[in-house]
Amino acid sequence: PAAYKVGLLLQAETVRWLADRLDPKVPLILDPVFATSSGSSFFDPDLLSSLREYLFHRVALLTPNRPEAEAIVGFKLSSEADVRRAAVQIRAQGVKAVLIKGGHNEGERLLDYFDDGGQTFFLEAIRQPGHYRGTGCTLSTALACYLAQGLELRDAVVAAHSYVQAAIAEAHSKESAHLPAHFFTPCLSNLYAGETSPKKPFTPLRRSLGFYPVLPDTAWIERLAKTGVKTLQLRIKDQSAAALRASILRAKELCEANDITLFVNDAWQLAIECGVYGVHLGQEDLDLLSSSELETLRTSGLCLGISTHSLAEAARAQTLRPSYVALGPVFETTCKSMRFGPQGIDRVGEWVHRLPSMPIVAIGGLKLEHAAAIKAQGANGIAVISDLIQAPNPEQRMNEWLNIWGL
């Protein structure tokens, strides 16, 4: 097997039997079922002791609901701080990661909490009217399936959560208490890496991004500004603040003269100061922003684009409600060292389905022959660096790109 999922265990002997037979190299999802949806209790202190002694150290992810987590740690979970503390204590008992489910919370807004000892996050769901059976079993099974398909654990958690929420919504629409299997690509759940309060959206794009060159200096902008392109990004690295400010102002002047919307890479404070159209941030740049700095950027009126490379990053980006989300690298690229492998063209279409209210931009290793396929996947824009600036005739290449994209 590529993954294990273990659910209801009734006896301590079963736990010991499993511990002897499970391959320790295969990831194990353990759903510690202590009660049924209808209220029947299976909790036994001896069983819990056996889980701790024989199985917890094998577990890649434990998926308790709140009452089950309370039984494991021995205290009530009455606040987000309690949930965070419980996750730390559960990991201290041997499991590699824990997902504490929030379905037993009161209120309409339900939060599941994930902790693997690295970056923690909450996943949001909105309570559907009615009662649904087997939601926890479905979640842990979906998790094992996504791990078996090769997803990393965080991405599998996001994908499984999104799958279950879509199944609950479908069951509600059919007035059924049982979750149906579904075979469409569900929308991503919102992921909160820090604060868990919803925020207002960033300024929306005033037009589609279309062909979206990323250029290394103002000389390139000046050279290509009159080709008819409508969106550009200035991506300058290793320049002093004063020189970068001058470059941004010059780029802004050139773009305004040619009705081009200008995004600035990384330098969000200078982008605000210079009053450009938008800023583009990578995940590392987001990590460096405090909540107050992010709010400053939000209230500045600038558009915001965010790079994503995985489902967890895409769910996090969606929650911030930016102007667009970029997916990459679609193919191998020499412009930037990446820890994520190539995504492929089909993944662009998946992002479009998973983030239906978000404009999607494809980037990374893209060449002219990919343009039609990327557009057919429903992307709002296609960002290109090397295929344009390394072309023998960049102006001609720009025209070819604009013609294919229909601009």
Image: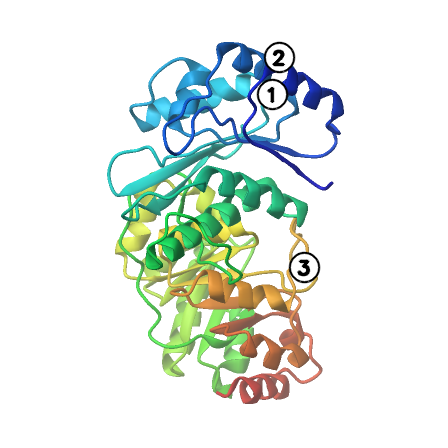
Q: Position of residue 49 (x, y in %)?
A: 55, 11
73 and 32: which is toward the camera? 32
For the point 30% across and 54% down, the residue is 298
Q: Position of residue 226 (x, y in %)?
A: 48, 86
The label nearer to you, 3 versus 1, is 1
Residue position for label 1: 56
352 and 267: which is toward the camera? 352
Mark 2 burial class by Cα count in 10 Å: few <14, some 14-19, many 20+: some
Mark 1 burial class by Cα count in 10 Å: few <14, some 14-19, many 20+: many
Three-letter residue code for mark 3: Pro
Circle 1 — which element? helix
Q: Earlier in the sequence, mark 3 or mark 2?
A: 2
For the point 38% across and 51% down, the residue is 319
Three-letter residue code for mark 2: Glu
Residue position for label 2: 53
Q: Earlier in the sequence, mark 3 or mark 1?
A: 1
Quarter of the figure that contains the N terminus: top right
252 and 321: which is toward the camera? 321
The answer to whether residue 368 is left or right of residue 119 is: right
Distance between the alpha carbons at the discs numbered 1 and 2 = 7 Å
Three-letter residue code for mark 1: Phe
Q: Position of residue 18 (x, y in %)?
A: 69, 23
